[in-house]
Amino acid sequence: MTAYPIGVEVSCDGPAEQTACPDSAAVSTRFASRTARQVRADGRSDGWARRRRAGRLVDLCPHCATTP
Ligand SMILES: [Zn+2]
């Protein structure tokens, strides 16, 4: 019997507060990544960024992270 762990996806919060991300990308869970913290660490190596916006933390995909 094979058990598949329930993964975590970190989705992009978009280039701006009212703007949805053009490609609803998400960091997919990788083999060794089970927690949001681990998935975000994976994302950082792909160019994902974690920023503070309006007092809360948002996740930005590589595309949005380079959009001013
Ligand atoms: Zn994005």
Image (spheres, rainbow, N blue to C red):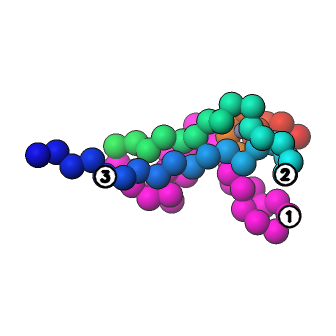
Left of 61 or right of it: where is 64? right
Q: Residues within 10 Å of mark 2 (few under 14, many from 20)?
A: few
Identified at 67% across, 40% down, the residue is 61
Q: Nearer the viewer, mark 1 or mark 2?
A: 2
Q: Earlier in the sequence, mark 1 or mark 2?
A: 2
Q: Is residue 6 magenta?
A: no
- Do the CB atoms of the residues marked 3 and 2 lie less than 8 Å apart? no
Which amino acid, mark 1?
Answer: Ala
Q: Residues within 10 Å of mark 1 (few under 14, many from 20)?
A: few
Left of 49 or right of it: where is 53? right
Is disc 1's CB within 8 Å of ligand 1? Answer: no
Which amino acid, mark 2?
Answer: Glu
Please say if 63 is above or below 43. Answer: above
Please say if 68 is above or below 23. Answer: below
Left of 30 or right of it: where is 2? left
- Mark 1, residue position: 54
- Mark 3, residue position: 5
Q: Which residues are magenta?
A: 32-59
Please tell me in which quarter of the rendered image ligand 1 is found: top right
Q: Nearer the viewer, mark 3 or mark 1?
A: 3
Which amino acid, mark 3?
Answer: Pro
- Mark 2, residue position: 17
